[in-house]
Amino acid sequence: MISAQAWADTQRLWGFQQMGHELRPCSVAIGLGSHDLGVADTTADLYHRGMMPLIVFTGATSRTTRERMPRGEAEHYCERAMELGVPADAILVEPRARNTGENISFSRALLEERQASVSSVLLISKPYEERRAYATARKLWPEVEWLSASTPMTLPDYVDSIGDARLVIDMLVGAQQRIMVYPQRGFMIRQDIPDDVAAAYHRLVGNGFTSRLVPTAAARD
């Protein structure tokens, strides 16, 4: 049973992750692979709204996707987007990345290999990872303009869509931890963290929502 305090703390982290960017057409979109096919759905919707002419789906598999997406996250995202009417020639697939840093670096290399002209990128992620993804992208590819996007939905609706409240909270806590510790490791730009967000994070950790935390000396994820 998840307490009212834990839900309130989760809502604080959820709100902090939302960047609130006003979307406009960009050179390309990068859809970050994960367990959530909603990223592919949102990417397809934005394509049909004329927000970008080209999409890169990036991602191999992880412990949360290897059974559900055996051909790799990027491949499954590509298939989903094509089912939703995105033409195959508008999609590039980057199938090797296993963390957010690799998502950005490998996508950049693929775009450069294809000689795509990129001045702005629409970065599409899960709703609870907008800020983490943005901070990573800004660090690794500072020469372009970044706009963050995700499926517009409330926390309760997102939990219902995933069907596992604890997984969502654990993922949110993990994303928040990385925002706090990864700038010191050179993985992302520094973000100012409000006191109430930091307090909410520490309470959730204290209540055992820790399955997605990285140890102090852990490798990047």
Image (cartoon, rainbow, N blue to C red):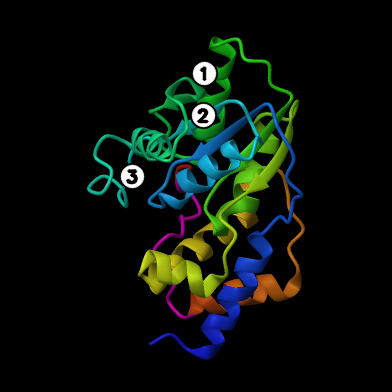
User: Which amino acid lies under the numbered mark 2 shown in the image of this protein?
Assistant: Val
How far apart are the two marked residues, 3 and 1, measured between alpha carbons?
Answer: 21 Å
Q: Earlier in the sequence, mark 3 or mark 2?
A: 2
In the figure, residue 147 lies in which quadrant? top right
Q: Percent from the top left, x then y, of residue 54?
A: 57, 26
At x 33% / y 44%, what residue is drawn? 62
> In this picture, is 210 found above or below 103?
below
Q: Provide residue 19's location: percent of width, then percent of height.
A: 71, 55
At horizontal 52% and vertical 65% (from top left) the residue drawn is: 173
Q: Are marks 2 and 1 in contact (CB under 8 Å)?
A: yes
The residue identified by callout 2 is 56
**Tag 1 residue:** 110
Image coords of residue 99 (percent x, y): 46, 40
The amino acid sitting under disc 1 is Leu
For the residues labelled 3 and 2, the Cα–Cα distance comes to 19 Å
Which residue corresponds to the image point at 50% horizontal and 60% vertical from the top-left? Answer: 174
Q: Which residues are magenta?
A: 207-218
Mark 1 is surrounded, within 10 Å at the Cα level, by few (under 14), some (14 to 19) or many (20 or more) other residues, namely some
Q: Residue at x 45, y 48 (%)?
A: 218
Report which residue position mark 3 lands on: 62
Q: Secondary structure at mark 2?
A: strand
Tell which circle, 2 or 1, labels the residue nearer the N-terminal end: 2
Few, some or many residues within 10 Å of mark 3 (<14, 14–19, 20+): some
Task: State if disc 1 and disc 3 touch (CB < 8 Å).
Answer: no
- Residue 221 in sight here: no
**Numbered disc in front, either 2 or 1:** 2
Inspect this view and state whether residue 192 appears.
yes
